[in-house]
Every structure is written in structure tokens, then in C-alpha cells.
Image (spheres, rainbow, N blue to C red):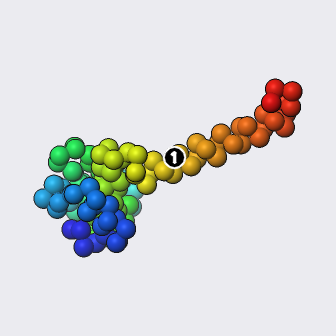
Amino acid sequence: MFELLKKETLRIVEKLGLKESDFECQFIKGFGKGGQKKNKTNNCVYLVHKPTGESVKMQKYRERDANLKTALRLVIEKVELKLDPKNSKKMSKIDKMREKKRRAKKKSKKKYNPEEC
């Protein structure tokens, strides 16, 4: 299953010490818009990381492998955020956005309320 992942994601997997046996993968029938082909085939992926209980259901693409790859990447991101939040990629993006908003707020205050600064 991990052979579908990119090198960067594989590094995260190694850092967290995840094993393929930790994941439970099921292919279920699709649902929603997309026509008969989507609803008849088992291309929807339900992936669970057993130790943490994090799960993802993915049916963005018509191909099983593409859905599996995307679901695996999302579950790994969720597990990383749960196990190592300080060093996770998602948390660093959130911190950057917070800093950007803080700077914009400060700049706006300075522009419209110069006597307060």
C-alpha cells in the first residue's frame, strides 16, 4: 500500500513509525452524483488507522488506486497531527496563516487608528 506514496509522505510514515498492518482498507460501492458507473463499482475507499481510530472515506476519482493514494495521504496527515502536532506540516501552515492575519490586523490598526499604536 505504501508503494503508492511519494517520498516526502514516506518520510513522515517512517518518522511516525507507521506500519501497513496498522491500516484497515475496505473498498465499498460509490454514492452520489456521477452516474451508473460510479454507483456500481467498488471504487470508494474506506481507510482506518486502527491504533488512533482516524478514518477517511474517499471517492473523489473513478480509479481505485487514485482514491486509495489520496485516502492514505489524508489519514497519514491526520495521524501526524494527532501524534506530533508541533512538527506536523498542517500545523505549520496554520501557524503561518495566523501570523499573516496578525500582521494584517496590526497594519490595519496602525492605518486607521494611529493614536492607539
Quadrant of the rendered structure where residue 47 is?
A: bottom left
Pinpoint residue 38: horizontal percent, then vertical percent.
32, 63
**Residue sticking out furthest to the left:** 21
- Which quadrant holds the C terminus? top right
Q: Residue at x 86, y 27 (%)?
A: 115
Q: Residue at x 53, y 45 (%)?
A: 95
Looking at this view, is 2 or 18 the one in front? 18
Instruction: List the single residue furthest toward the top.
Output: 116
Residue type at the position of mark 1: Ile
Q: Position of residue 4 (x, y in %)?
A: 28, 72
Residue 96: give x, y in percent of width and height.
56, 49
x and y, in percent, of residue 75 in the image: 30, 53
What residue is drawn where x is 26% and y is 46%?
Answer: 54
Image quadrant where residue 101 sits: top right
Q: Using the image, determine if residue 85 lies above or below residue 4.
A: above
97 or 28, nearer to the observer: 97
Is residue 71 visible to us here? no
Quadrant into which the N terminus falls: bottom left
Q: Secondary structure at mark 1?
A: helix
Q: Which residue is mark 1?
A: 94
Q: Where is residue 74, by image quadrant?
A: bottom left
Report the side of 23 relative to 62 (left or right). Answer: left
Any part of residue 52 in sight:
yes
Looking at the image, which is closer to me, 21 or 61?
Answer: 21
Other-residue count near label 1 (Cα within 10 Å), few / some / many at <14 / 14–19 / ≥20: few
Question: Would you place residue 100 above or below residue 6 in this image?
Answer: above
